[in-house]
Image (spheres, rainbow, N blue to C red):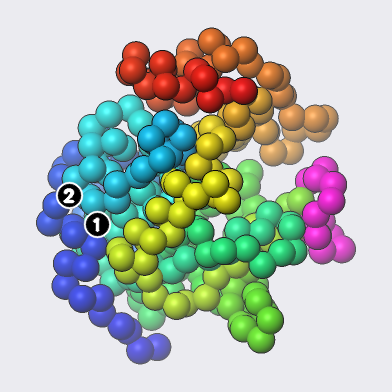
């Protein structure tokens, strides 16, 4: 494999307070750019840094410079979308000396449709192999996934499949599959799997994320510019807030997911108690009218 080295400081790692980031993750272990370190950072990031789109809903803007992202996601009890996650994570990988690049993918969730590339991920090159480190999906895999023609991975609760295949007409790439569960109206394999997202290895840079992030935060055609959406993942469950619908999914537990509709004035308390996200009084005032 030919390793492509990123332009030095492409991801602005010098602007990151690495100690604060690692403390937020609860990582006090090895900092050498090894596979063991990467596995630990990946898992800790997924479980410690929230996925939420509140900044777009409240202000139609999500600055992606490292100081702004760090202030929202590390200096305050907030989170961000994949673009903010990857901006933060890439800065940390750069500081720690990992060889990596960033790609974008098309989220399908079983739709079978060609959607825009609006999901960012890191591909890390280690020990002659490439690893998908997808920390910014919300319900992100807790484990790294090796880029091969066919990889299956599980952490004992969550399962994924990575397959090399045609991902758009005439274009080969990778498709990440997850169990389709009881979902109706989605394309699924004969044994019950559906495509979560697809991607190629077309390299992306901070300027590319800026463009996709602007669309995601401000366009009326974006799924996340007006509608509140949050996810918090645990090893055995995930909490999801879609507008005012609070759902808890527990893999392997029979029966329907726990779900209920919240009243608008309940949402700030749920954000704090369930998602660990505390809004200022000003932000709560901006949020409540949007919870239709």
Left or right: 205 as drawn, with respect to 275: left
**Looking at the image, is 34 positioned above or below residue 228?**
below
Q: Quadrant of the N terminus?
A: bottom left
Residue occupying the point 12% across, 56% down: 14
**Residue plotted at (66% across, 67% down):** 114
What segment carries the magenta color? 181-193
Viewer can see residue 79: yes
Which quadrant would the C terminus be assigned to in this image?
A: top right
Numbered circles on residues, count: 2
95, 26: nearer the viewer? 95
Q: Which residue is mark 2?
A: 16
Q: CA distance from mark 1 to mark 2?
A: 6 Å
| Secondary structure state at the residue bearing disc 2 | loop
16 vs 247: above or below = below
Please tell me whether the stretch drawn in magenta is mainly helix, strand or loop. Answer: loop
User: Could you say which is closer to the camera, residue 183 or residue 148?
Assistant: 183
Q: Earlier in the sequence, mark 1 or mark 2?
A: 2
Report which residue position mark 1 lands on. 91
At x 38%, y 71%, the residue is: 204
* Residues marked 1 and 2 touching at CB (< 8 Å): yes
Q: Give the residue furthest to the left.
A: 14
Left or right: 290 as drawn, with respect to 129: right
Measuring 65% from the left and 77% from the top, which residue is drawn there? 168
Position in image of residue 57 (x %, y %): 46, 35
Dot 1 alpha-carbon crowd within 10 angstroms: few under 14, some 14 to 19, many 20 or more: many
Q: Reply yes or no: does residue 100 show up in magenta.
A: no
Decide: is 243 above or below 158: above
**Callout 2 environment at 10 Å: few (<14), some (14 to 19), or many (20+)?**
many
């Amino acid at each position: 494999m030919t390793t492509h080295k990123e332009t030095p400081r492409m991801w602005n790692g010098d602007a990151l307070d690495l100690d604060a980031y690692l403390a937020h993750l609860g990582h006090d272990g090895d900092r050498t750019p090894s596979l063991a370190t990467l596995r630990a950072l990946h898992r800790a990031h997924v479980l410690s840094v929230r996925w939420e789109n509140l900044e777009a809903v409240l202000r139609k803007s999500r600055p992606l410079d490292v100081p702004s992202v760090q202030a929202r996601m590390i200096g305050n009890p907030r989170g961000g979308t994949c673009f903010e996650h990857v901006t933060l994570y890439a800065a940390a990988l750069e500081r720690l000396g990992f060889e990596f690049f960033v790609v974008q993918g098309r989220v399908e969730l079983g739709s079978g449709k060609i959607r825009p590339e609006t999901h960012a991920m890191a591909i890390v090159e280690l020990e002659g192999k490439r690893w998908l480190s997808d920390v910014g999906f919300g319900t992100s895999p807790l484990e790294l996934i090796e880029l091969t023609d066919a990889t299956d991975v599980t952490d004992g609760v969550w399962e994924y499949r990575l397959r090399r295949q045609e991902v758009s007409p005439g274009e080969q790439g990778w498709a990440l599959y997850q169990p389709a569960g009881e979902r109706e109206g989605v394309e699924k394999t004969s044994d019950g799997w559906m495509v979560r997202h697809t991607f190629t290895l077309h390299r992306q840079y901070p300027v590319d994320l800026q463009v996709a992030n602007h669309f995601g935060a401000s366009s009326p055609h974006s799924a996340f510019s007006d509608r509140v959406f949050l996810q918090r993942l645990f090893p055995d469950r995930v909490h999801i807030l879609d507008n005012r619908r609070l759902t808890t999914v527990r893999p392997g537990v029979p029966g329907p997911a726990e779900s209920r509709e919240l009243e608008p004035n309940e949402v700030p308390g749920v954000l704090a108690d369930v998602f660990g996200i505390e809004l200022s009084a000003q932000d709560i005032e901006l949020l409540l009218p949007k919870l239709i």
